[in-house]
Amino acid sequence: MPLINFAAREINYKIVYYGCGLCGKTTNIQFIHRKINPDARGKLVSIATEEERTLYFDFLPLTLGKVKGMQTRFHLYTVPGQSYYNASRKLVLQGVDGMIFVADSQITRLDENVESYLNLWDNLLGQGDDLSKLAFVIQMNKRDLTETFSVEDLNELLNHTGSPVVPASAVTGEGVFETLKIVCKQVIAKTA
Amino acid sequence: MYTCAAAGSRKGAFVPKRKGLVINDRQLDLCDDLLQKLKEVSGSTFLALISTSGQPITTASDEYHPETLSLASLAASSFAATQQLARILDENEFTLLFHEGRALNLHVTQVTEQVLLIVTFGRETQVGKVRLYTQRAVEVLRQIFEVDEDEETPAMDADFESSAGRAIDDLFQDA
């Protein structure tokens, strides 16, 4: 549900990075913060544990600038990936317009990926959103590592909606902006 | 390769499509007037209306300008967490959140299902006064928003979609 402020000529979209613990959600958002034009970004806010694991969320506002006279912003959030933080994940999902599911491509992380993917759809269905209005992209992260599933295999395992898929390595930045670009265009298309 | 879905033939028009939060000129004018009055009578330093998903709607402030985007995101999340705490404690709802600091206090109140009111004020201002006037203001704000929250969110037009697509390509091309 975007916030459209016609009086102030502003429109705000909320995009959430979802996925299992250590899949690279925060790394995505940190890479975007480092590489994007500083004029287009706000402050990166992270609520993390002392071990730098996400406790509640990371938040990064991006400003697209004025589009047809409307100041257009994307608010990027991550969720805590560890399974016992589900109550926090539900809160971050409130009012979401676009989802990026970050899958860890490593073979050893399959169970965590599937659990997180099912948990995402449980939570979305639980909050009663019209899922046909939700932008959704799957990022196959950690493609730089060995002993990974092929993109095709992961796609078959995780992509029941036939959503766009982007191979990526958040550490090197490969695919990070491509993923964001797709979901940003989708959220706008979904409100058009 | 992804391609943007075509928006059809609605070029140049805002067409009802989905429920969301839309602020029109009348609402914003009423809210701005009310926040300004509330700031004066309550002795508060900064006020902001935000959505429950963490996006700012409007603010009232003389000199003190906190980072509004971060503040809205954190306040909305904190308020949402507080509501969940209420649920766990078998309380129907906690309708306000209050943080007391050394120099500054923060007061967050629910206005409607989709709107929160943030008020900050210094030690020189009484908490009771802020609560009293805030509660009165919330009753008026609720009427401003509830009239229109039942309406469907207008969709953006096709021109907006294509222009935004180009802006997205530009923003991310050199990154």
Image (cartoon, rainbow, N blue to C red):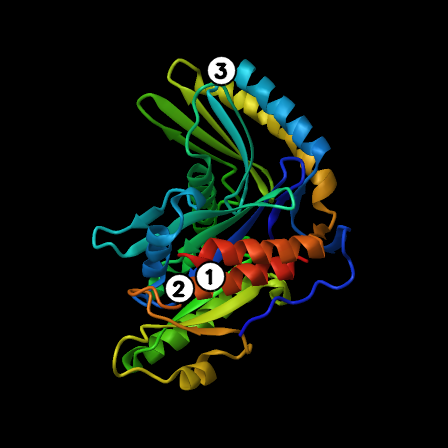
For label 3, the SS is loop
Mark 3 or 1: in front is: 1
> What chain is tagged by disc 3?
B
Please rate how many residues cluster around mark 1, counting C-alpha atoms within 10 Å: few if below 14, some from 14 to 19, many from 20: many
Q: Amino acid at mark 3?
A: Gly
User: Do tag 1 and tag 2 residues touch (Cβ < 8 Å)?
Assistant: yes
Pick whichever, A73 or B99, lies toward us. A73
Q: Amino acid at mark 1?
A: Leu
Q: Position of residue B81 (x, y in %)?
A: 43, 47
| Rendered image quadrant of residue A70 | top right
Q: CA distance from mark 3 to mark 1?
A: 43 Å
Pick whichever, A137 or B40, lies toward us. A137
Q: Is residue A48 above or below residue A112?
A: above
Residue at 56 percent across and 61 percent down: it is A185
Which residue is identified by label 2? A176
Which residue is identified by label 3? B43
For label 2, the SS is helix
Q: CA distance from mark 1 to mark 2?
A: 6 Å
Pick whichever, B2 or A147, lies toward us. B2
Q: Are marks 2 and 3 on the same chain?
A: no
Q: CA distance from mark 2 to mark 3?
A: 46 Å
Mark 2 or 3: in front is: 2
User: Do tag 2 and tag 3 residues touch (Cβ < 8 Å)?
Assistant: no
Q: Amino acid at mark 2?
A: Val
Residue A180 disc label: 1
For label 1, the SS is helix
> What chain is tagged by disc 1?
A
Q: Is residue B34 above or below residue A21?
A: above
> What chain is tagged by disc 2?
A
Residue at 34 percent across and 80 percent down: it is A110
